[in-house]
Amino acid sequence: MLTEEKQRLLKKAAHTLKNEIELSKDDMADEADLASALTDQALSLRLRGRERYLIEKIDLAIERIAEGEFGECVVCGDDISIKRLRARPVTTMCIACKEEQERRERMYSD
């Protein structure tokens, strides 16, 4: 499942590089069209950047599988529930530790 997701993301990235990086003359008919094309391009690149980060997480999850550590919380060492792993296979924390992390992040961001 992780390998399939990684391949899907890599194909999207290759498509972006091949088809969405360069602006055509049609995109530059007027300033509004150019601005729209640049906005679309920036959004696409931002999404690919986020996907690159997800690919890194997928690689780490595959590494954890190879090392026999997949499904183990890196914070407390408890098992991560199957339900959570199915929903977010790249997770490294059990739900209790993740909720605690998010609570602390909210506390410091206010």
Image (cartoon, helix red, strand yellow):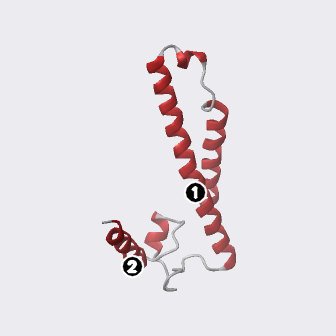
**In which quadrant is the N terminus drawn?**
bottom right
Which numbered disc, 1 or 2, marks the residue closer to the eye? 1
Give the farthest residue toward the right: 66
Which residue is drawn at the image coordinates 52% and 73% (left, top)?
92
- Can you say whether 96 is above or below 19 in the image? below
Left or right of residue 22: residue 82:
left
Which residue is drawn at the image coordinates 35% and 66% (left, top)?
109
Local packing at callout 2 (Cα closer than 10 Å; few below 14, some 14-19, many 20+) is few
Q: Position of residue 79 (x, y in %)?
A: 50, 82
Which of the 4 image quarters holds residue 94? bottom left
- Can you say whether 82 is above or below 28 in the image? below
Q: Which residue is mark 1?
A: 53
Give the farthest residue toward the top: 29
Q: In this view of the protein, which residue sits in the foreground, 34 or 60?
A: 34
Q: In this view of the protein, which residue sits in the foreground, 15 or 109?
A: 109
Q: Which residue is mark 2?
A: 96
Q: Position of residue 9 (x, y in %)?
A: 60, 49
Which amino acid is tagged 2?
A: Ala
Q: In this view of the protein, which residue sits in the foreground, 5 or 91?
A: 91
Kind of element beneath mark 2:
helix
Which residue is drawn at the image coordinates 59% and 16% (left, top)?
25
Give the farthest residue toward the bottom: 77
Marks 1 and 2, how far apart in space?
Answer: 24 Å
Q: Position of residue 84 (x, y in %)?
A: 44, 70
Which amino acid is tagged 1?
A: Tyr
Give the farthest residue toward the left: 110
- Can you say whether 110 is above or below 12 in the image? below
Which of the 4 image quarters holds residue 106? bottom left
